[in-house]
Image: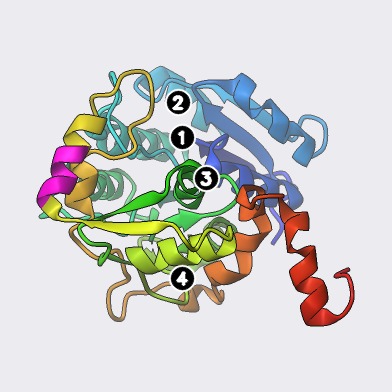
Amino acid sequence: MSYRYRVVTVFGGSGFIGRHLVRRLAKSFAVVRIATRHPNQANYLKTAGAVGQIVPLAVDVRDDASVARAVKDSDVVINLIGALFETGPWSFNTVHVDTPSRIARLAKEAGADRVVHVSALGADAGGTSNYARSKAAGEKALLAAFPEATVLRPSIVFGPEDRFFNKFAAMAQISPVLPLVGGGKTRFQPVSVSDLADAICAVIDREDAKGRTYELGGPTTYTFKELMQLMLKVVQRKHRLLLPLPWGVSETLGGILEKVPLIAPLLTRDQVELLKRDNVVSANAPGFKELGLTPTAPEVILPTYLHRFIVGGRTNTLTRDVGVHEKYPT
């Protein structure tokens, strides 16, 4: 993969997925523009490339002129912007519908060759969740403006900076009980952020990816309860109680937590609604296999970043490892 002298604009490039994607694009010698509300928060990514190769830009995605400046002369435009909950002026409609529509329309006007949009596996025009419906509406608006765009629908994404395993591992440090929304029966196919970044790069290279939608799920399907058990095993807190919460109780709890000011809500009523449906790939949907990629299981990656939640840290596993291997691990 080489994009030497090509310009790639990444909306939301300073976020969780973006930081992994930008580093890959930098290695391909592309000039990478990071379009973000707070360009100073993307300065740390400049060291991933040569001088002047990675350029953070201040962009207001609600303004045509601002977005047009970001996509001008771009060969590839990638949208990673998304929201798990609504706050202030950033409604689901603004973030998931208006933003991809505007980016696609102005990318088409600017003559971009490729547009890649990262949506979500839960996108569903007929869903009961506002999040799911807005994601589906955003895909439709995007493709109406740029029919050749590629849409990626990942299941829950995990990695060193994720807001899933890290959040629950932090809760396990202080709470003897972890709640299981809806009883913990919702199924997921967690996707490594590294694998997702590889998939984005792969579709840029493929002509047959134009106009297609890929559903990206990891190699294994887990229930929410099984994911919590896996996390607790990694952080060595298997004695924590997993408490099943009926849907009615979960909705009440979400209604309370979404009203707590100044902090990101741990749970909202819309997220509870979203959890009522499994988050797994559809039968026969194109995915990692069609892109020539093999996704990595969470069991391989979680120990590489959740060790900080272990009492005593990573070194706390030395006694166990010596007992198993009869030597200190290298």
In the picture of the structure, the residue carrying the numbered disc 2 is 68
* Amino acid on which disc 4 is placed: Gly
Whichever of callouts 4 and 2 sits on the residue coming sooner in the sequence is: 2
Magenta-drawn segment: 248-253
Res. 186 image quadrant? bottom left
The image position of residue 258, as x and y in percent, is 25, 30
In the picture of the structure, the residue carrying the numbered disc 1 is 110
Nearer the viewer's eye, disc 3 or disc 2?
3
* Residue closest to the eye, 275 or 182: 182
Label annotation for residue 142: none
In the image, taking residue 183 as reference, residue 242 lies left or right, namely right
Q: CB under 8 Å between callouts 1 and 2?
A: yes
Q: How crowded is mark 2: few (under 14 residues within 10 Å), some or many (20 or more)?
A: some
* Residue closest to the eye, 217 or 324: 324
Please, what secondary structure does the residue beneath circle 2 have?
Answer: helix
**Which quarter of the rendered picture does the N terminus lie within?**
bottom right
